[in-house]
Image (cartoon, rainbow, N blue to C red):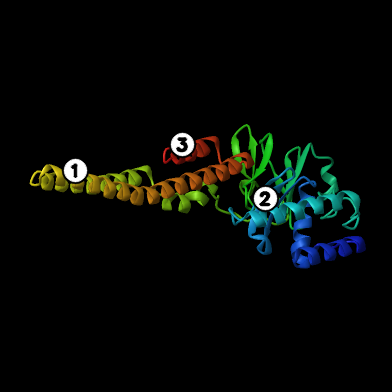
Amino acid sequence: MQKLTNVGENLVNDIASRYGLSHGAVTHMLVAVNNGGGSMAQFNCPELGGSGQWMRGGMTMVGDMFNNGLKTTVDNLCNELANILSNNQIFPVIPAGTPGSNQWWPSNLGNPFSSGAQNNIRYAVFPNRLAVELNGQVSVYDTLDHNIGGVSQQQGNNTSLTFNSQWGTINVSSLPLITGQPLPVVAKTNFADVAAPAMNNMPTNNNLSNNSLNNNNGLNSSANNSSSQQQSTNGNLDNNYSANTNGINNDNNSHNKQPIDQKDQKSITQTLDIIEKLAQLHEMGALTDDEYNTKKSDLLSRI
């Protein structure tokens, strides 16, 4: 458990009481916001829907994608924690070179030319060395002949770390470990699959067209039968029968049209909601441009 100052403990207890959360859940979110520099947080908190991400300014993702109430709770909580961190000494001051401090890497490495943090993992890049801290444990890797130009972490995952060099994208776990424990090797998650169940259950235009065609066929058959009967009746009966038939057909059209319109409107609303979620995933970097455009085109084709 992350140590807090007396001020930090009091603030966490107050927030936990007001939000109906446990002390551990609030502390977890506090650490996540702190690791994100007070402007973002990536977390995995069961009390708040599992894995999620928050960015100051209103962009919030939770495990339950369509739970707007939970999104609002996470957004309010993270904003409050960010304000607390900027105005109070929440964590004890830790000497430089000690895990958990702002200068957490071994002092003999000097000053990094690049550093950052996401979730419970932090990294610092030095000449020929890469230092990584995961849950307070520091590991140092040999970067060999790689000229690191950027480090990234897979969205929604706490331990996947890759970097870009002149040789392309390299996973940290492929580098020689000098000191510490290696990072766990995890499978990559494709967040485009999150929307797949909803997409599979959505009615398509083809289904709607088939329903419309079937209904029209029923009306046409009724009209044909009426036409046969009209030929065997006199003029007055023809007029009466035609008037009655028109009334029946109008009722049938009104009866059949309503479910189709409701289903069509519902499918369009579902499609637009999913596109909005995919756009958020794309902005976060969880989806590539190709993945996003492909999914978006497929969804729009169903409207």
Disc 1 secondary structure class: helix
Q: CA distance from mark 2 to mark 1?
A: 69 Å
Q: Position of 174 compared to 19: left or right?
A: left
- Mark on residue 209? none
Circles 3, 1 touching at the beta carbon (< 8 Å)? no
Q: Nearer the viewer, mark 3 or mark 2?
A: 3
Name the residue nearer the viewer: 126 or 120.
120
Q: Which residue corresponds to the image point at 74% horizontal and 63% vertical from the top-left? A: 25
Name the residue nearer the viewer: 45 or 253.
253
Q: Earlier in the sequence, mark 2 or mark 1?
A: 2
* Residue 26 place in picture, x, y as percent: 77, 61
Report if residue 300 is visible in the image: yes
Q: Amino acid at mark 1?
A: Asn
Q: Nearer the viewer, mark 3 or mark 1?
A: 1
* Residue 96 place in picture, x, y as percent: 89, 50
Q: Which residue corresponds to the image point at 76% horizontal and 47% vertical from the top-left? A: 36
Q: Position of 300 compared to 280: left or right?
A: left
Q: Residues within 10 Å of mark 2 (few under 14, many from 20)?
A: many
Q: CA distance from mark 3 to mark 2?
A: 26 Å
Q: Residue furthest front?
A: 236
Q: Which residue corresponds to the image point at 88% horizontal and 64% vertical from the top-left? A: 10
Q: Earlier in the sequence, mark 3 or mark 1?
A: 1
Q: Nearer the viewer, mark 2 or mark 1?
A: 1
Q: CA distance from mark 3 to mark 1?
A: 52 Å
Q: Amino acid at mark 2?
A: Gln
Report if residue 139 is visible in the image: no
Assign the C terminus to one quadrant of the image: top left
Q: Amino acid at mark 3?
A: Ser
- Mark on residue 53? 2
Residue with the mark numbered 1: 239
Residue with the mark numbered 3: 297
